[in-house]
Image: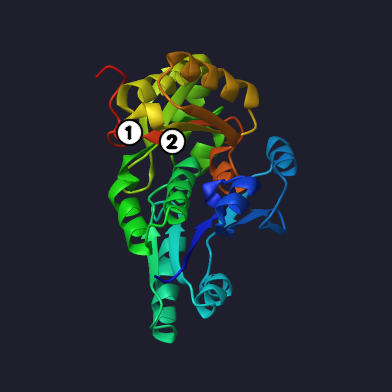
Amino acid sequence: MADFKIVCNNTADLPDDVIRELEVTVMPLAVNIGDEIYKHIPMEDFYQKLRAGAMPTTSAANIGEANEIFEPILASGCDLLYLAFSSGLSTTYETLYMAAGELRERFPERKIYVVDTMAASSGEGLLVIKAAEMRRDGKSIDEVRDWVESNKLNVAHWFTVGDLGHLKRGGRVSAATAAVGGMLNIKPILIVDNEGRLTKADSVRGRRQSLLFLAGMLEDSIIEPEGQIAYIPHGDCVEDANWLKEQIVNMGVVKDVVVHYLGPVIASHTGAGMIGLVFLGRDRGASKPGA
């Protein structure tokens, strides 16, 4: 059985120690702030710029960047499984799918699989971690690829934001909605839908109520909770993230809860103050708790 490597994007927001432990290769997408282009920027520096009023933009990966990472893996005799950032949020998947097609002609003896995770941040990370654990347990590249394809639409991403400015800029909410929401302290509840896009699922008045809504969604729709780790990505609002963690821990339904920073690529579009909750659920649906 040929060895295989797992590649993902930095949009999976995996901590460095997890990347090293699981031996995952990360392809960074760039963040543009003013005239500067960053593929690696310390979290503290990024959020300081964001809170100072920076409006970052992001860039998808290109074929040249794909080849820089893919070619050495294939030339070393390894097969390759690339778990891509959602095609609903970036053109990276489409571009690297084309790159993989060209590389198959040059490395016909190698398996090269490109999977659209339809996921972002902890959702993408959850799939990468599971894939790496399966590889470590001796599963083949085909078995791992098939598991990801079969389970990716069970990765539930629920999140809310601190203010609506970045969502307004990205066209996720209208200018009128952003203005009224700000005045009335309305917090949108968003999901990553089955097409891998951000979709508004509901609205809640007040920050704490929005966090309780997220906890309610986990309790309502999580599957096999006793073996699950729930993930809480946050946009530089660790106190709120830890408060949400406490609510979930008190429910006593999951194995563990991991709080981590939302990386610069995703945070460029959601802004500081974003709080998410990611877990494996019955589906990604938009039903309300108790429905």
Dot 2 falls on a residue whose secondary structure is loop
Q: Judge left or right: residue 69 versus residue 147.
A: right
Query: Which residue is identified by label 1?
Result: 281
Q: Is residue 250 above or below residue 128?
A: above
User: Which of the two labelled residues, at mark 1 and mark 2, occupies the earlier sequence position?
Assistant: 2
Q: Is residue 290 above or below residue 275?
A: above
Q: Position of residue 164 (x, y in %)?
A: 52, 31
Q: Residue at x 55, y 57 (%)?
A: 24
Q: Position of residue 72 (x, y in %)?
A: 57, 76
> Of the residues shown, which amino acid type is indicated by label 2?
Val
Q: Residue at x 53, y 80 (%)?
A: 75
Q: Is residue 39 above or below residue 152?
A: below
Dot 1 falls on a residue whose secondary structure is loop
Give the image quarter of residue 116. bottom left
Q: Is residue 194 visible?
A: no
Q: Is residue 195 visible?
A: yes
Q: Nearer the viewer, mark 1 or mark 2?
A: 1
The mark found on residue 173 in the picture is 2
